[in-house]
Every structure is written in C-alpha cells, then in structure tokens.
Amino acid sequence: MSIVTIMKVPGDTAKFREFFDSHKEQVAAISARAQAAGCTSHVFSQGDGVTVAVDHWDSQAAFEKFLADPEIGETMAGAGASGPPEIEIFEVIDVDSW
C-alpha cells in the first residue's frame, strides 16, 4: 500500500534555502537514495517558520527505513531545523481501481 507523508520541520526557513543552495550534491545524493528506497514524488514548501516536505512512498516501511538513516536527521539539523519534525502519514486510495 502506498502512502503520502507530510513532514513539517520547524526552523529557520532562510537557512534551509541557503543550505540547499550550498549543498546541492549532498541533497541530490539523498534524493537519489530516497527514490531508490521507494519515494516516487517529493516537493518542499515553506510557511512561517516551517519547511514542509510532501512525499509519495511505495510503503510506510520504506519511508520509515529511509527516515531512520542518521544522515537525514543530521541534514535537517544542518539545514536549520529547530526541533523534531511533525510527521503525518496517509494511505493512498487507488481510485483507478473503482
């Protein structure tokens, strides 16, 4: 069963953008690992004091395994996260099979 995850990371949004601009190779490598692990789409957005990642994953197990990689937490901290992310997970409803 595929899922959609919404991860809200509190922190300095300007620092987040600066980090991603100055660490493009590291970010690209993490993105490639996520795709190999089962992430089929990914988008970042920002609001007041929060960066949000919305992903589509093949499974919750794939997402949880990827998120358990210590580099992910280290990268979020280096990018300006001021606390742990708030994560919501939703089951994808396959309307094509209706």
Image (tube, grey):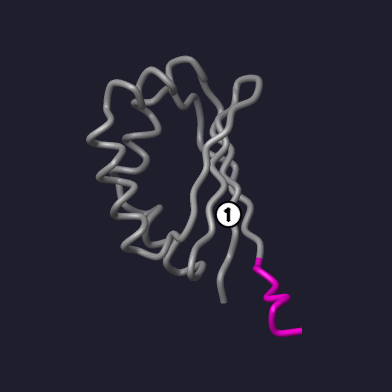
Foreground residue among 16 and 80: 16
Asked whether 38 or 61 is in front, the reply is: 38
For label 1, the residue is 5
Could you tell me which residue is drawn at 46 percent across and 60 percent down?
A: 40
* Quarter of the image where the N terminus is located: bottom right
Where is residue 22? Give x, y as percent. Answer: 28, 21
Q: Vertical placement of 34 versus 98: above or below?
A: above
For this view, does 94 lie left or right of residue 59?
right
Image x and y of residue 19, in percent: 35, 22
Instruction: Classify residue 95 by image quadrant.
Output: bottom right
Q: Where, by quadrant of the figure, is residue 38 drawn?
A: bottom left
The magenta stretch is 91-98
Q: Is residue 74 above or below residue 18?
A: below
Q: Is residue 50 above or below residue 34?
A: above
Query: Disc 1 marks which amino acid?
Result: Thr
Q: Is residue 57 left or right of residue 98?
A: left
